[in-house]
Image (cartoon, helix red, strand yellow):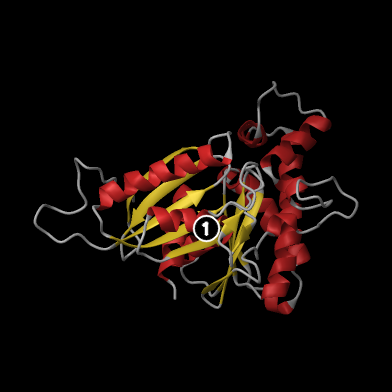
C-alpha cells in the first residue's frame, strides 16, 4: 500500500540518514504521475495531475512541477530516475511522440528529465513495458518468467517480460499488442492500420459497437455503464463484452505462440469489469490457443492498478 510522504510527514525521522530512492514518472495522455520508490518497491510518495491539452512546453511544465514536488519530498536522496511514457518512444535518442499527446512529437523527454535531476542515471521505457515490469516485480506476475502485461481501457497497450527481463525490442516499442490485427478489412485504427484488436476490444470500441446495434444508453455513457448493463443481463451489453473478449483471446493466443508465454496480466478500466471480461476471454482462449505448449497459459487480473507504471519505471531504472 502506498504511504504518502510530504514535507510535514517526511520519509525518515530527523537525524536518520534517508534511504536512497528512485524517482519514477508515468506520463500519458490522461495523467502525469510522479513517485518515489524505495529499495523493496514501496511507493513512499506519489502525486499526479491531468495532462494539459496545450503545447509541448505546457505539458513539460506539468511534468517538471511533479518532479520538483518529488525531489522536495526526497530531500536529495534520489539515486536514479525511471520514466514510463506513452509511445511511441525512441530508446536510443530518448525522445517520445505519444499518439495521445499531440504536441509531443520527437520531444526530448529523457534529456529534459536528466537536466531536471542532474547527476543520476535516467532510463526511459514505454508505459506498457513498465506496467508489465511492475506487475512482474511486485504484482500478479511475480512467479512468471514469460509475461505479457496488458492494459485494456480507452486503448489497448502492452509490454513484455521475457525470461525475467523487460523486452523493449529494436526501438523500445515491442509489446504494442493493441495493434495486432485480428479482423481483416476491419475498422480503421488510430495507428493507420485496419482491424486492430483495439478497434474491437477497447472500452470505447465496445460501446460504439453496442450503440450501433441498438444499445440505447443516454449520451455520455461509456464502458463503465456498459459493464453495469451487462451485469444486469442486458443482452447487447453482454454481446459487446463477448465480442471484445474474443478479439483479445485471438490476440493473446498469437502473442503467446510467438513469445512462448506462461502468463498474461490484464489491467485497465475495462478489466475492472471482472468476470464479464475474463470469463468469455478464458473460454475463447481455449478455442484459439490449441498448441500443446500453450496449454498452461494463464490470464489473470492485474494487482497494482494505477501504480504499476510507476513501480515498473522504478524497476527499469534499477536494471543494468
In percent of width and height, residue 139 lies at: 45, 61
Query: Could you tell me which residue is drawn at 67 percent across and 47 percent down?
Result: 99
User: From where the camera sits, is residue 203 visible?
Assistant: yes
Horizontal side of residue 151 vs 178, given as left or right: left
Vertical position of residue 79 compared to residue 301: above or below? below
Horizontal side of residue 152 vs 136, given as left or right: right
Residue under pointer 1: 131
In the displayed orientation, state which residue is furthest to the left.
Answer: 15
Quadrant of residue 30 within the rendered picture: top right
In percent of width and height, residue 65 lies at: 39, 41
> Dot 1, how many residues are within 10 Å of its Cα: few (below 14), some (14-19), or many (20+)?
many
In percent of width and height, residue 9 lies at: 20, 43
- Residues 86 and 161: in front is 86
- Residues 143 and 163: in front is 163
Vertical position of residue 62 compared to residue 114: above or below? above
Quadrant of residue 230 within the rendered picture: top right
Query: Could you tell me which residue is drawn at 76 percent across and 46 percent down?
Result: 190
In the displayed orientation, state which residue is furthest to the right.
Answer: 185
Horizontal side of residue 194 vs 172, given as left or right: right
Vertical position of residue 127 compared to residue 161: above or below? above
Q: Where is the C terminus found, in terms of image quarters?
A: bottom left
In percent of width and height, residue 228 lies at: 61, 33
Q: How many dots with numbers? A: 1
Query: Could you tell me which residue is drawn at 66 percent across and 24 percent down?
Result: 220
- What element does badge 1 sit on? helix
Query: Could you tell me which residue is drawn at 72 percent across and 47 percent down?
Result: 201
Quadrant of residue 289 within the rendered picture: bottom right
- Residues 205 and 169: in front is 169
- Residues 137 and 190: in front is 190
Amino acid at each position: 500500500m502506498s504511504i504518502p510522504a510530504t514535507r510535514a510527514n517526511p520519509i525518515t525521522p530527523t537525524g536518520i540518514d534517508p534511504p536512497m530512492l528512485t524517482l519514477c514518472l508515468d506520463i500519458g495522455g490522461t495523467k502525469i504521475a510522479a513517485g518515489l520508490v524505495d529499495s523493496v518497491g514501496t511507493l513512499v510518495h506519489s502525486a499526479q495531475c491531468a495532462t494539459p491539452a496545450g503545447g509541448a512546453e505546457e505539458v513539460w511544465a506539468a511534468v517538471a512541477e511533479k518532479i520538483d514536488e518529488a525531489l522536495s519530498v526526497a530531500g536529495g536522496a534520489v539515486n536514479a530516475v525511471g520514466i514510463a511514457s506513452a509511445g511511441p518512444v525512441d530508446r536510443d535518442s530518448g525522445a517520445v511522440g505519444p499518439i495521445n499527446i499531440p504536441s509531443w512529437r520527437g520531444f526530448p523527454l529523457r534529456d529534459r528529465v536528466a537536466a531536471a535531476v542532474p547527476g543520476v542515471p535516467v532510463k526511459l521505457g514505454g508505459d506498457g513495458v513498465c506496467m508489465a515490469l511492475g506487475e512482474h516485480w511486485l504484482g500478479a506476475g511475480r512467479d512468471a518468467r514469460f509475461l505479457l502485461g496488458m492494459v485494456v481501457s480507452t486503448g489497448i497497450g502492452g509490454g513484455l517480460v521475457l525470461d525475467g527481463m523487460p523486452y523493449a525490442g529494436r526501438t523500445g516499442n515491442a509489446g504494442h499488442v493493441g495493434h495486432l490485427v485480428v479482423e481483416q478489412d476491419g475498422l480503421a485504427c488510430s495507428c493507420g492500420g485496419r482491424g486492430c484488436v483495439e478497434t474491437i476490444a477497447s472500452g470505447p470500441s465496445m460501446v460504439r459497437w453496442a450503440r450501433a446495434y441498438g444499445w440505447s444508453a443516454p449520451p455520455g455513457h461509456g464502458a463503465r455503464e456498459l459493464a453495469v448493463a451487462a451485469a444486469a443481463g442486458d443482452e447487447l451489453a453482454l454481446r459487446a463484452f463477448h465480442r471484445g473478449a474474443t478479439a483479445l483471446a485471438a490476440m493473446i493466443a498469437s502473442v503467446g505462440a510467438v513469445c512462448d508465454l506462461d502468463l498474461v496480466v490484464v489491467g485497465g478500466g475495462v478489466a475492472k469489469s471482472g468476470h464479464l471480461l475474463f470469463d468469455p476471454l478464458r473460454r475463447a482462449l481455449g478455442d484459439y490457443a490449441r498448441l500443446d505448449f500453450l496449454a498452461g497459459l494463464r490470464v489473470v487480473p492485474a494487482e497494482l492498478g494505477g501504480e504499476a507504471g510507476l513501480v515498473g519505471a522504478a524497476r527499469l531504472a534499477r536494471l543494468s
